[in-house]
Image (cartoon, rainbow, N blue to C red):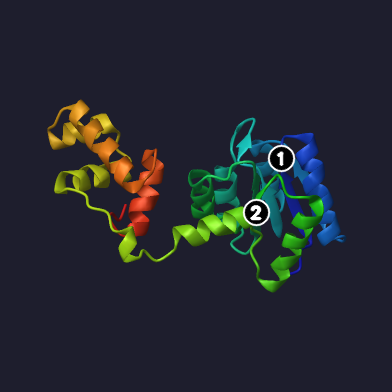
Amino acid sequence: MVVTTALIVEDHPDARDWLRRAVQTAFPDAHIAVEATVAGGLAQIARSAPNLALIDLELPDGSGIGLIERLRNQSPDAVIVVSTVFADDQHLFAALRAGASGYVLKDESAAKLSGMLLGIARGEPPLSPGIARRLLDHFHEPSPTDAVALTPREREVLTLLAKGLTVAATAELLGIATNTAAGYAKNIYRKLNVSSRAEATLEATRRGLVNP
């Protein structure tokens, strides 16, 4: 793939400069447009969809996720890279589901990021090492040591939580007290070694316990 046009959507000046240097080094002939908001990014995409986009997730007027979705729908072949400080599964998988094809953390040097971007021509998605490890861990095939014993009721609660229901809504649907449902959720988190509903959903999906 030859990158001729690039779009950077980042509201912090230092981060914008970092991204611009990396893109200029990797693709010196590319035209680079820079925006600081979701609205600005959408306007640029409406005028001309770029080959490459580097998008922050937290912008002054909203989330970069919607921008990723819009660009992916308009230009399926564009390379969309998230540049962010968030290294958790919730942000990572939301971005990938929206259509991101790369995910880099802002602690990388401009030179290292430039090298990652050059890998696009070889079909290598730009991924920070820590993010690549997270992906490998997530899609790691569960082994017998991954087995976890959930009671039938805990499985019911976990399935509903994985569908996005709150503890209170889960309790109402199952006809049990909210405190009881909270107790089940606490047991589930302990058994899966997680601390939030999002983490529980990802881990349960990985283990094949639910299919949200």
Q: Which residue is mark 1?
A: 10
Q: Quadrant of residue 142?
A: bottom left
Mark 1 is on which residue type?
Glu
Q: Is residue 197 above or below residue 103?
A: above
Q: Position of residue 55 (x, y in %)?
A: 66, 46
Q: Which quadrant does the N terminus fall into?
A: bottom right
Question: Across the whole image, how many numbered discs are drawn on residues?
Answer: 2
Q: At 77% across and 62% down in the image, what residue appears? A: 115
**Other residues around mark 1 within 10 Å, as few (<14) / some (14–19) / many (≥20):** many
Q: At 73% across and 61% down in the image, what residue appears? A: 117
Tell me if 76 is positioned left or right of 158 in this view: right
Mark 2 is on which residue type?
Val
Label located before the other in sequence (1 or 2):
1
Residue sticking out furthest to the front: 145
Q: Position of residue 86 (x, y in %)?
A: 59, 42
* Disc ID at residue 81: 2
Q: CA distance from mark 1 to mark 2?
A: 12 Å
Tell me if 44 is positioned left or right of 188 in this view: right
Q: At 62% across and 64% down in the image, what residue appears? A: 77
* Disc ID at residue 120: none
The answer, for residue 176, to whether it is visible in the render is: yes
